[in-house]
Image (cartoon, helix red, strand yellow):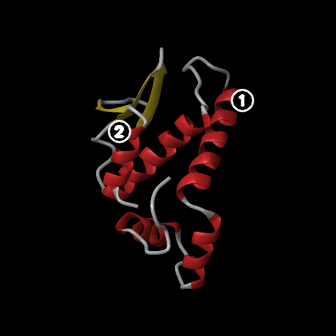
């Protein structure tokens, strides 16, 4: 999947993209009064694959409505992170498509990420 596809998805969903230094994470999603923004620390996210990874994960939060506050108990944070990851995988890495790629010989997450970032004919259009 190309980064531009993710930017297009964000634009379609009216999600702002902000570059800002973050201390404890590479990225975060902020949702307040119907305004949503994905914040990315470019000093920690230096490659297209890394940027795609954080954008997809944060979009998982958005798509699953899995938000939490910074002072939320760890158990709830873990639950929201798991829900966001699951939604991201369901949306951006459909199981049948991944299975086809694995059958073609791709075996690592890095190989899959590189192929999906570059655009796979198996992948098709982004939802």
Q: Is residue 40 left or right of residue 28?
A: left
The residue under the point 66% across, 42% down is 82
Q: Position of residue 70 (x, y in %)?
A: 54, 20
Rendered view: 1 above or below 88: below
For the residues labelled 2 and 1, the Cα–Cα distance comes to 32 Å
Farthest-out residue, bottom: 104
**Which residue is more in the foreground, 94 or 76?**
94
**Which residue is more in the foreground, 13 or 2?**
13
Q: Position of residue 66 (x, y in %)?
A: 61, 32
Residue labelled with disc 1:
75
Farthest-out residue, top: 33
Rendered view: 127 above or below 71: below
Residue labelled with disc 2:
11
Secondary structure under tag 2 reads helix
Label ID, residue 10:
none
Q: Are marks 2 and 1 in contact (CB under 8 Å)?
A: no
- For mark 2, does the 10 Å Cα neighbourhood hold few (<14), some (14 to 19), or many (20 or more) residues? few
**Which residue is more in the foreground, 45 or 85?**
85
User: Which is closer to the viewer, label 2 or label 1?
Assistant: 2
């Amino acid at each position: 999947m190309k980064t531009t596809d993710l930017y297009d998805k964000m634009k379609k969903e009216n999600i702002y993209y902000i570059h800002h230094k973050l201390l404890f994470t590479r990225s975060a999603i902020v949702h307040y009064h119907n305004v949503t923004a994905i914040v990315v620390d470019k000093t920690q996210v230096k490659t297209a694959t890394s940027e795609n990874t954080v954008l997809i994960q944060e979009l998982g939060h958005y798509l699953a409505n899995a938000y939490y506050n910074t002072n939320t108990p760890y158990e709830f944070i873990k639950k929201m992170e798991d829900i966001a990851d699951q939604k991201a995988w369901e949306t951006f890495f459909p199981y049948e498509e991944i299975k086809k790629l694995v059958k073609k010989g791709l075996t690592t997450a890095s190989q899959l990420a590189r192929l999906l970032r570059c655009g796979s004919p198996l992948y098709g259009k982004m939802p």
